[in-house]
Amino acid sequence: MSSAVANAVAACRPYCGDDCRIGLILGSGLGAWADSLDGARTVDYASIEGFPRSNVAGHAGRFAIGERFSKRVIAMQGRFHYYEGHTPDALTAGVRAMKRLGVTHLLLTNAAGGVDKSFSPGDLMLITDHINFSGSNPLIGPNDDSFGPRFPDVSNAYDRALREAVKAYAANCGLFLREGVYMMFSGPCYETPAEIRMARALGASAVGMSTVPEAIAAAHCGLRTLGISLITNMAAGILDQRLSHEEVQVAADLAAARFSALIDGIIKDVF
């Protein structure tokens, strides 16, 4: 995978320059945010030799590079998931490429199912910590010491100081922001009601199928990271209704403007 990372860096470098400190990985419904970057240029994953592909509906599968508030930004419009069959190492490719491009601050976003019964669809949740219930880890295999140590500390994977700054920003703007623990399952099936009861008992506030591998890789690389979940639906067994990807996409699209405004605020006032 190191060659894929090098190829991604070579493809994106002409647009990133030497001052691209901010990276984002955009979840469902947020692809249009990156399209609106000033001077946006894109690099398709498919054009990068050896780089993984994103095959999920609603994920464009490309890097977008441009400026927001005169700050150079690189965003991944589409991420990689275990359930797509990627190796653990492949899931680190985007984060590691960003590290090589000079990124120091990373924002991870996702769509998630609400486990905390006080949550409602449309809520935004600042991730305070995670539970990796995927059964794997993106750092399995030989360690690349140029990125980080064999046994990295992930106790501050979601940077405390940055979280406090986001909470202060949200309070000043009158933006309601939840906080909680994100629990990752491997997918692709949605969780069972029994699994959701377990997740709640273990302290999870929301569940999903992404983000944790990227947060682990970012901690390994020494990136200061934030994570925000959009609660698109209540998890299995809470409401008497079936879960579907279409429901997630509709909810993500409805909340996209509010979520995008929060991202703008983070880039302008926090990063």
Image (spheres, grey):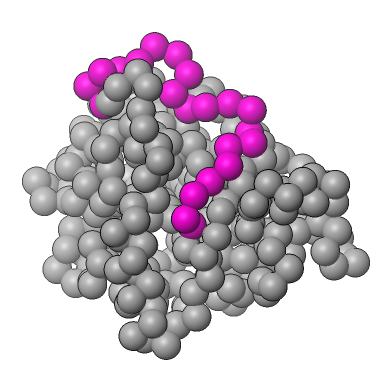
Residue that sits furthest to the left in the current view: 18
The boundaries of the magenta stretch are 127-147
User: Dividing the image into 4 quarters, which one contains the N terminus?
Assistant: top left
**Is 243 situated above or below 152?**
below
Q: Is residue 34 left or right of residue 187?
A: left
Residue 4, picture quadrant: top left
Q: Give coordinates of residue 146: x percent, y percent.
A: 22, 21
Q: Is residue 170 visible?
A: yes
Residue 140 rendering spot, x and y as whole percentages = 48, 19
Position of 6 with respect to 88 (left or right) is: left
Q: Nearer the viewer, residue 40 or 209?
A: 209
- The answer to whether residue 174 is left or right of residue 238 is left
Say whether residue 253 is visible. no
In the rendered image, residue 271, in percent from the top left (x then y), is placed at: 23, 62
Q: Residue at x 11, y 51 (%)?
A: 19
As drawn, 28 above or below 252: above
x, y percent for residue 194: 85, 47
Q: Most extreme residue toward the right, as rendered?
A: 240
Q: Nearer the viewer, residue 56 or 271?
A: 271
Count of marks overlaid on the render: 0
- Name the residue located 51 percent from the left edge and 65 percent from the top edge: 179
Q: Residue at x 73, y 68 (%)?
A: 117
Q: Is residue 251 above or below residue 48?
A: below
Check residue 144 for magenta coloring. yes
Instruction: Indicate yes or no whether the magenta region holds residue 139.
Output: yes
Magenta stretch, main secondary structure, is loop
- From the viewer's perspective, is 36 left or right of 180? left
The residue at the point 45 percent across, 82 percent down is 175
